[in-house]
Image: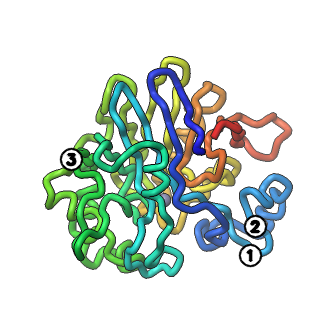
C-alpha cells in the first residue's frame, strides 16, 4: 500500500515506476570524482549508491496530488512499450499505470498533468498505445506545458536530446497537442489556491518546480533541480543532461539557500524512498554547506 501524505488540504502519493541502481556517478555528473564518492560512502551505500555496480540509486516516479477535489499528476515517468535508444528505458513493462489504479484513481479521473520539464523520464505516460496509435493516457486532463519549455522542444526533429534518447516528443507529447489537451502556461502559473509552478530553469529552459502551500506544511517538488542527494553536498555538480549547466547550478544554489532550515518539505523527482526531506545548513565544522535530511514519511 502506497503511503499518502496529508499537508492540510492537499494529499500527495508517490507512484513509482522504477527504483534502483541506474547511472554511474561519472555518467551523470561530469564533475564528480571517485574520491568524493568514497568520502561520502558511509551514508551513500547501499541506499543511495550501489558500490558493487558503481551506480547511483535513482527513483523514477510521479507525484499524485489531490487538492480541493481535483487530481493533479506531476510528471509521468518513462512509460511502457516505448522504443528508446537507452536499453534501460526501451520497450519496458513496469506497470506504473496499474500502481496508479491501485490507489483508486482511474486515468479518466486525472484533471491536470504537470510536466516539470520535457525529458524522456517525465513524459512517458502522457500517452499510451491503443490500437497501434499513441493517445493521451488521461483523456479528461489538461496537460500543462510552460511556454519556454515547449519553445525549446517543439522543433524536435534532430534535437540533440532526442538523438540521444529516441523521439519521445513525437510519441509522448505531440499526441497531447493533437488531441487538443495541451495548455501553454507561464512558469509561475497558479493551478489552484494551494498549488503553483515556480521557475527553476537551467536543467532545461522551461523547467519548473511545483509549490504546495498546505494548511500545515509548505512543500516543494523540485523536479530535476536535484537528481541525487549528493548535489546538496556538491551544488556545483550539474548533470551531463542539463541544457545550461551554469544556470542549473545557480538555480540549485538558490533553492538550497531558500529552503535551508525554513521548514519546507522538499521532494526531488529522482530521490529514492522516502524521497521527502529537509535541506539543512550543515554545522560549521562540516565539510559541506548543505545536506539533505530524509524524512521517513513515504
Ligand atoms: Zn529526470
Residue at the image position 79 percent from the left and 69 percent from the top = 51
**x and y percent of residue 238 in the render?**
55, 59
Horizontal side, residue 53 vs residue 259: left or right: right
Horizontal side, residue 50 vs residue 193: left or right: right
Horizontal side, residue 32 vs residue 140: left or right: right
- Residue under circle 2? 50
Which residue is the extreme one toward the top? 215
Residue 163 shows up from this direction: yes
Question: How would you rate the neighbour count of disc 3 (Cα within 10 Å): few for under 14, some for 14-19, many for 20 or more?
Answer: some
Q: Do the CB atoms of the residues marked 2 and 1 lie less than 8 Å apart?
A: yes
For the residue labelled by badge 2, is the local secondary structure a helix, a strand or a loop? strand
Residue at the image position 28 percent from the left and 52 percent from the top = 138
Closer to the camera in the image, 96 or 121: 96
Q: Which mark is residue 67?
A: none
Please state, as top left, top right, bottom left or bottom right, where the N terminus lies in the image: top right
Q: Mark 3 and mark 1: span between their CA atoms?
A: 41 Å
Residue at the image position 66 percent from the left and 36 percent from the top = 297
Residue 194 location, quadrant: top left
Counting residues from the start of the chain, the first of labels 2 and 3 encountered is 2
Please state, as top left, top right, bottom left or bottom right, where the C terminus lies in the image: top right
Question: How would you rate the neighbour count of disc 1 (Cα within 10 Å): few for under 14, some for 14-19, many for 20 or more?
Answer: few
For the residue labelled by badge 1, is the local secondary structure a helix, a strand or a loop? loop
- Residue under circle 3? 184
- Residue under circle 1? 53
**x and y percent of residue 57 in the render?**
67, 62
Counting residues from the start of the chain, the first of labels 3 and 1 encountered is 1
Closer to the camera in the image, 87 or 157: 87
Q: Is residue 129 above or below residue 164?
A: above
**x and y percent of residue 165 in the render?**
41, 76
For the residue labelled by badge 3, is the local secondary structure a helix, a strand or a loop? strand
Amino acid at each position: 500500500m502506497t503511503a499518502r501524505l496529508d499537508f492540510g488540504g492537499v494529499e500527495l502519493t508517490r507512484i513509482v515506476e522504477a527504483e534502483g541502481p541506474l547511472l554511474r556517478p561519472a555518467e551523470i555528473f561530469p564533475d564528480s570524482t571517485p574520491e568524493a564518492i568514497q568520502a561520502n560512502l558511509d551514508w551513500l551505500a547501499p541506499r543511495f549508491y550501489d558500490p558493487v555496480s558503481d551506480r547511483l540509486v535513482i527513483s523514477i516516479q510521479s507525484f499524485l496530488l489531490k487538492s480541493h477535489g481535483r487530481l493533479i499528476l506531476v510528471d509521468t515517468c518513462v512509460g511502457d512499450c516505448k522504443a528508446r535508444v537507452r536499453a534501460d528505458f526501451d520497450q519496458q513493462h513496469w506497470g506504473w499505470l496499474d500502481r496508479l489504479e491501485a490507489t483508486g484513481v482511474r486515468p479518466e479521473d486525472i484533471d491536470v498533468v504537470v510536466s516539470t520539464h520535457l525529458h524522456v523520464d517525465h513524459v512517458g505516460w502522457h500517452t499510451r498505445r491503443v490500437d497501434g496509435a499513441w493517445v493521451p493516457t488521461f483523456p479528461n486532463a489538461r496537460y500543462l506545458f510552460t511556454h519556454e519549455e515547449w519553445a525549446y522542444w517543439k522543433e524536435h526533429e534532430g534535437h540533440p536530446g532526442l538523438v540521444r534518447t529516441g523521439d519521445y516528443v513525437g510519441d509522448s507529447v505531440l499526441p497531447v497537442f493533437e488531441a487538443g489537451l495541451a495548455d501553454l502556461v507561464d512558469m509561475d502559473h497558479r493551478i489552484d489556491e494551494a498549488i503553483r509552478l515556480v521557475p527553476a530553469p537551467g536543467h532545461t529552459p522551461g523547467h519548473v518546480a511545483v509549490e504546495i502551500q498546505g494548511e500545515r506544511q509548505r512543500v516543494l517538488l523540485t523536479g530535476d533541480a536535484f537528481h541525487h542527494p549528493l548535489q546538496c553536498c556538491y551544488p556545483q555538480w550539474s548533470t551531463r543532461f542539463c541544457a545550461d549547466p551554469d544556470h542549473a547550478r545557480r538555480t540549485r544554489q538558490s533553492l538550497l539557500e531558500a529552503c535551508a532550515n525554513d521548514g519546507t518539505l522538499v521532494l526531488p523527482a529522482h530521490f529514492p524512498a522516502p524521497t521527502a526531506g529537509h535541506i539543512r545548513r550543515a554545522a560549521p565544522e562540516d565539510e559541506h554547506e548543505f545536506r539533505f535530511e530524509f524524512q521517513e514519511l513515504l
